[in-house]
Amino acid sequence: MAALGKVYLVGAGPGAVDLITVRGARLLGEAEVVLYDALVTPEMLALCTQAELIPVGKRSGQRSTAQTVINEKLVDAARRYQRVVRLKGGDPMLFGRADEELRALEEAGIEVEVVPGITTAVAAAAATLQPLTKRGVARSVAFFTSSTAPDQPDHPALPETDTLVQYMGGREAAATAERLLAEGRRPELPVVVVENCSRADQSVRRLTLADLAHGLDVAHGPVLVMIGEAMAHRPHQTL
C-alpha cells in the first residue's frame, strides 16, 4: 500500500497573484493536485498548470461545495497523491474553515502543513494607505464576520475595539452600522469599504457610519468593511 501524501493548506492572499508568498508559489509549482477556492484567480492557477485542478469553492449566497465533501476530497487526494495543495483565499487560519479540514486530515493520519497568506484586511489597509492602528487614536483591531455555522444562530454581538474590520460584509454591513449607532458610536465615524481587494477591478468607497446604515450597493466580488477613527482621511491623502 502506497504511503499517504502530505497536504499543504496554502493561503493565496487577497487576490493579486504576486501577493502569494514565495513558499506558497513554490508549492503550487510542485503540487500534483490543487483543490482551490472559488475566489482564487485564473492567474493564480496558472502557477500550477502541471497539477490536477479541483474546484471546491464556497461563496456566500451561491451554490457551493459542502465542507464535509471538501474534507472527503482532501483525504481522498492524499491517498492518491504525494503532494496535495488546498489553496485558500487570504490566510487559511482566518475565516478559512481550516479547523474542520485539519481535524479530518489528522483523523485520517495525514500529515499537514499550513502556509500563511496575506489576509484581506491587511491587504486592504495597504491598498488604501489606511493604517488599522494609529498612535493616540486606535490601538486595537478586531476582524469579524456575521456568518455562522449552518446549525448555529446568528451572532449579533460586536467586538469592543477601536477599529472594526468586517469580512464578507456586503449584505451584513448595514446591520453592523445600525448596532454601532445604537451603542452610541457617532454617525460621522469614518468607514472605508473595499471590494475586490488587490485585483484589477478593486474599488474603494469612503463614507460615514450613518451612510453605511443605509446599506451598500450590490457587490460583484468580496467586500471588506473597515470602521473606526483610524479610517479618517488624512489632509493630503489622495486615495
Image (cartoon, rainbow, N blue to C red):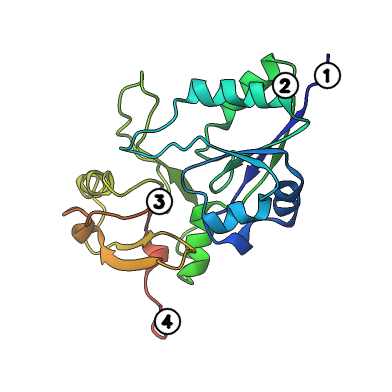
Residue at 67% x, 26% y: name it.
77
Disc on the earlier residue, 4 or 2? 2
The residue that disc 1 covers is: 2
Residue 203 on image: x %, y %? 36, 67
Residue at 38% x, 83% y: name it.
235
10 Å crowding of disc 2: few (<14), some (14-19), many (20+): some
- Mark 4 and mark 1: span between their CA atoms? 59 Å
Residue 172 on image: x %, y %? 27, 43
Badge nearest the viewer, 2 or 3: 2
SS of the residue at dot 1?
loop
Disc on the earlier residue, 2 or 1? 1
The residue that disc 3 covers is: 164
Give the quadrant of the C terminus: bottom left
Image mark for residue 237: 4
The amino acid marked with disc number 2 is Arg
Badge nearest the viewer, 4 or 1: 1
The amino acid marked with disc number 3 is Leu
